[in-house]
């Protein structure tokens, strides 16, 4: 199997406890869970129904404020047009951007906000937080989001980068969520940026990556 990000060779990884199979790229080290271990849409939705996210939860709000402070507002202004792609059961980030930063927000979510009102629009800011790890083939999504960006807009992405050590990977809390199927590295994000016609203007090498159109 070739890497879906850079087309390099991959090696097979088998979880020592549950036997789930993953494929790690030998070049960019992007890891993809084998499709035989993906949840059905029904099971995936069932997992999301257990999430308890609210704008009234100060810890959850602080989680997003940290993201905004690091990956968004050093690079764009307040009070503009925004899209939160993969907004979840309660679109807390979109609510924060509207309430506290004057954004006119559009939301989309595969399970909770299916109407594709973002089509044929462009945005000053696109956010996708804790989303791309759920997507089986991320590159086409990045290409789609790039086409929704204005010339001076940014795309801010939040997803945890995987640990480099295989033993750490097996003990990593991120893979214990079976809805997570794609695991990124800074190098994988760099290749995505090149293929999607984007440039990386910020990466913390941990969780945040911010892109601008080339």
Image (cartoon, grey):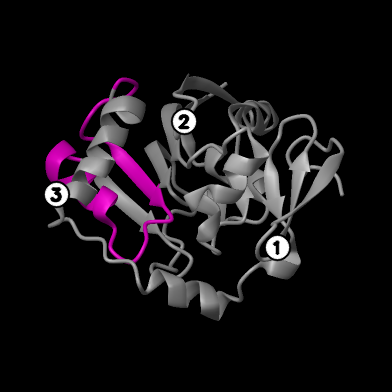
Residue 153 is situated, as x and y percent measured from the top left of the image, at 41, 29
Q: Which quarter of the figure has residue 36?
A: bottom right
Q: Which quarter of the figure has residue 6?
A: top right
- Horizontally, residue 82 falls left or right of residue 214, namely left
Q: Residue at x 55, y 54 (%)?
A: 175
Asked if the residue under mark 1 is in contact with the one under mark 3, i.e. CB atoms within 8 Å, the reply is: no
Q: Residue at x 47, y 36 (%)?
A: 149
- Horizontally, residue 99 falls left or right of residue 90, namely left
Q: Camera-side residue: 136 or 167?
A: 167
Q: Quick check: 193 above or below 110?
A: above
Q: Which residue is mark 3?
A: 58
Q: Which residue is mark 2?
A: 206
Query: SS at mark 3?
Result: helix
Query: SS at mark 2?
Result: loop
Q: Quick check: 161 above or below 200?
A: below
Please check the rendered image and state whether residue 79 is part of the magenta-colored stretch, yes or no. yes
Q: Quick check: 214 above or below 140?
A: above
**Is any atom of residue 143 visible in this view?**
no
CA gap, disc 3 and disc 2: 23 Å
CA gap, disc 1 and disc 2: 25 Å
Mark closest to the chain's N terminus, 1 or 2: 1
Please check the rendered image and state whether residue 91 is part of the magenta-colored stretch, yes or no. yes
Q: Which residue is mark 1?
A: 20
Q: Quick check: 81 above or below 1?
A: above
Residue 30 is situated, as x and y percent measured from the top left of the image, at 68, 39
Q: Which residues are magenta?
A: 74-102
Q: Which quarter of the figure has residue 5?
A: top right
Q: Nearer the viewer, mark 1 or mark 2?
A: 1
Q: Residues within 10 Å of mark 2 (few under 14, many from 20)?
A: some
Q: How many callouts does the rendering have?
A: 3
Q: Nearer the viewer, mark 3 or mark 1?
A: 1
């Amino acid at each position: 199997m070739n890497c879906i990000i850079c087309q390099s060779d991959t090696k097979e990884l088998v979880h020592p406890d549950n036997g789930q199979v993953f494929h790690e790229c030998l070049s960019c080290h992007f890891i993809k869970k084998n499709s035989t271990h993906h949840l059905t849409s029904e099971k995936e939705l069932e997992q999301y129904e257990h999430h308890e996210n609210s704008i009234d939860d100060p810890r959850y709000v602080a989680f997003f404020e940290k993201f905004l402070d690091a990956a968004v507002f050093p690079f764009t202004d307040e009070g503009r047009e925004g899209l939160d792609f993969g907004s979840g059961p309660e679109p807390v980030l979109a609510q924060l951007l509207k309430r506290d930063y004057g954004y006119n927000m559009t939301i989309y979510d595969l399970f909770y906000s299916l109407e594709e009102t973002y089509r044929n629009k462009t945005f000053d800011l696109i956010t996708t937080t804790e989303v791309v790890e759920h997507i089986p083939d991320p590159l086409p999504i990045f290409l789609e989001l790039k086409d929704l960006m204005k010339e001076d807009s940014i795309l801010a992405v939040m997803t945890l980068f995987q640990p480099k050590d295989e033993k750490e990977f097996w003990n990593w809390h991120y893979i214990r969520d079976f809805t997570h199927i794609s695991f990124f590295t800074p190098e994988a994000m760099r290749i995505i940026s090149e293929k999607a016609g984007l440039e990386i203007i910020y990466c913390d090498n941990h969780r945040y990556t911010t892109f601008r159109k080339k």
